[in-house]
Image (tube, grey):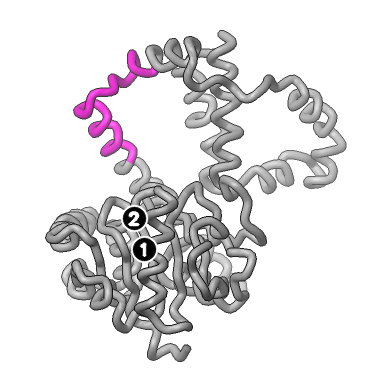
Amino acid sequence: MSQSDMKSIAVIGSGLIGRSWAMVFASGGYSVKIYDNQPGQAVNAIAEIRKQLQELEEAHMLRGELSAAQQLALLSSYDDLAQALEGAFFVQECVFEELKVKQSIFQDIERLVGKEVILSSSTSCLVPSSVFSTVHNKSRCLVSHPVNPPYYVKLVELVPHPETAATVMDTTHAVMTKVGQVPVCLRREIDGFALNRVQAAIIAESWRLVQDGVISVKDIDLVMSEGLGMRYAFIGPMETMHLNAPEGLEDYMKRYGDGIARVLTSFGPVPDFKGEGAKRINHEMCELIPSDQEHLLARKERRDQLLMGLAKLKKDHSNTSRNQTLEHQ
């Protein structure tokens, strides 16, 4: 597939993730065709995107080199699948997280696109071998799992089907990089992918510590937001260990490996997330942030504002580091 053919992307589904992907792809200069099988939904999605792009531009947080108006001009809406897929070299599916629905939509898509078109799913918990089980040509299929909200949290996990071609992974990695995402490639599929497995480990031990009366809901969140999260915002656990010993990672494990192993063996079984203990944790959480829509929406808006600020800080930090590197060359 030549570069001249790689201009149009189809986004299937116009919910939150679909709208976010459309904004991300448009920020990289791609023509984006948004499809939704509910008449009027894709049109409504573009109206919502217009509002968001204008707000981002006013806040000087618009991604890419194009203005909000230029990015908006790259978007079009469809309630006819064939029309939405016409001319697309890449298809990003964003329908709701139900296996049979995803399998069905990919069957329909495969009948309507050429053999070189890449088929990508946004699923967060379904492995590619399940999602694409009804697709005949599985070599062009993969999962591109974003992190919510994708516009501010740039990581995207690229998870191959066992039959996915290396060129498909490479092309998708290039597309995601071009639009400003930070792609990571898994070498094989695994339940939960990488991000959700790490997140599940954090959730499990945080839950156990609260349930066992060791710490409060408020304070375990502070352990992350004011402790681990401060450095994990810029470097990961591997580099953290590498920097936390005088002679790097091997030295770190000589010093602390036995202690880490001892702590890990003290972890309890997978917690019960639905029993009586869970009710107490939920009550404690709701005392801090009530679960009605007004309070939750306010906290989500606060989260997004904070993520926007952090994204700007990381961008400025990256630009400064790049300039310093160029100065020393």
Whether residue 100 is visible: yes
- Rendered view: 284 above or below 261: above
Of the pair 103 and 225, the residue shown nearer to us: 103
Locate the C terminus and report the quarter of the image it occupies.
bottom right
Residue drawn at x 62%, y 56% is 189
Residue 95: which numbered mark, if any? 2
Q: Are marks 2 and 1 in contact (CB under 8 Å)?
A: yes
Q: Which residues are magenta?
A: 285-303
Residue drawn at x 32%, y 83% is 87
Give the residue type at disc 1: Ile
Mark 1 nearby-residue class (10 Å; few <14, some 14–19, many ≥20):
some
Residue 115 location, x and y as percent? 47, 83
Q: How many marks?
A: 2
- Rendered view: 46 above or below 237: below
Q: Is residue 236 magenta?
A: no
Toward which corner of the image does residue 11 lie, by quadrant?
bottom left
Residue 105: which numbered mark, if any? 1
Q: Is residue 299 magenta?
A: yes
Residue 166 location, x and y as percent? 62, 75
Of the pair 57 and 136, the residue shown nearer to us: 136
Q: Earlier in the sequence, mark 2 or mark 1?
A: 2
14 displayed left or right of 119: left
Report, in whole angstroms, how far the alpha carbon at label 2 lies from the one at label 1: 9 Å
Give the residue type at disc 2: Val
Mark 2 nearby-residue class (10 Å; few <14, some 14–19, many ≥20):
many
Secondary element under disc 1, as helix, strand or loop, is: helix
Observer-side mark, 2 or 1, equals 1
Residue 312 location, x and y as percent? 37, 53
Residue drawn at x 39%, y 70% is 91
